[in-house]
Image: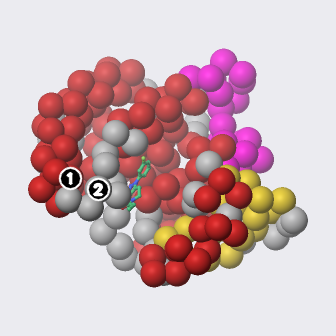
Amino acid sequence: MPHYKLTYFNLRGRAEIIRYLFAFSGIKYEDHRIEQADWPKIKPTIPFGKIPILEVDGATLHQSLAIARYLAKETGLAGQTPLEQALVDAIVDTTDDFVSMFPWGEKNQDVKQQIFNDLLTNTAPGLLRDLESFLGDKKWLVGKTVTWADFYWDVCSTTLLFLKPDLTDNYPKLLALKERVQALPAITAWIQQRPKTTL
Ligand SMILES: CCC(=O)N1CCc2c(cnn2-c2cccc(F)c2)C1
């Protein structure tokens, strides 16, 4: 088994999907969390200057979704066929497109809040309507077993619900999917043991 070292901030953020995959698969890894104050010193040492990164024995992987897709493929959570894998990727990318619209690093709090509110009020409903319709009466978003698309929905919607607690009030199927993911024993255990952070 390779030695895995995940490096990110002490946030769920873009690393939590990777942590879910490690938790669900039971693979041991180093969950290295850096202080924001240390980032300017560390950033120049990181290929492409962004985190999370995952060091796998001597190799360094970057881009959170590439890392997650690698782990999902290794652990059977990427989709059972090439077609399912494409559907999984499309749902992940659709979800990530939305969460990536948020100006997470904006220093002007008034500007940040205005954009966050606009996205949550005016853009989120269309995405949630489409995801609710895509899920329909299925147990999981793609195929007959859980995939990292389901995990990603839970990871991202957990942060979105912190920002807008009534976010899923009109989307019961999506709320039920969150509950189904969080009821997976390994995910339940991870959520209970992980550091408590707002984002
Ligand atoms: C200053 C950086 C910061 O506050 N965060 C980084 C990005 C982020 C946070 C919470 N969720 N999230 C995220 C998750 C997945 C996709 C994505 F685009 C964004 C918090």
Query: Which labelled disc corresponds to residue 112?
Result: 1
Q: Nearer the viewer, residue 160 or 53?
A: 53
Is 33 placed left or right of 95 in the picture? right
Mark 1: amino acid? Lys
Mark 2: amino acid? Glu
Residue 151: where, in percent of width, then height? Answer: 49, 47
Q: Is residue 13 visible?
A: yes
Tell me which segment is drawn in magenta: 67-87
Label 2, on which residue?
106
Point 69% across, 69% down: residue = 45
Residue 97: where, in percent of width, then height? Answer: 42, 34
Examine the structure image and report whether residue 68 is included in the region drawn in magenta: yes
Q: Residues within 10 Å of mark 2 (few under 14, many from 20)?
A: few
Q: Secondary structure at mark 1?
A: helix
Residue 192: where, in percent of width, then height? Answer: 42, 74
Query: What is the spatial separation of the Cα atoms under label 1 and label 2, in whole angstroms?
Result: 6 Å
- Residues marked 1 and 2 touching at CB (< 8 Å): yes
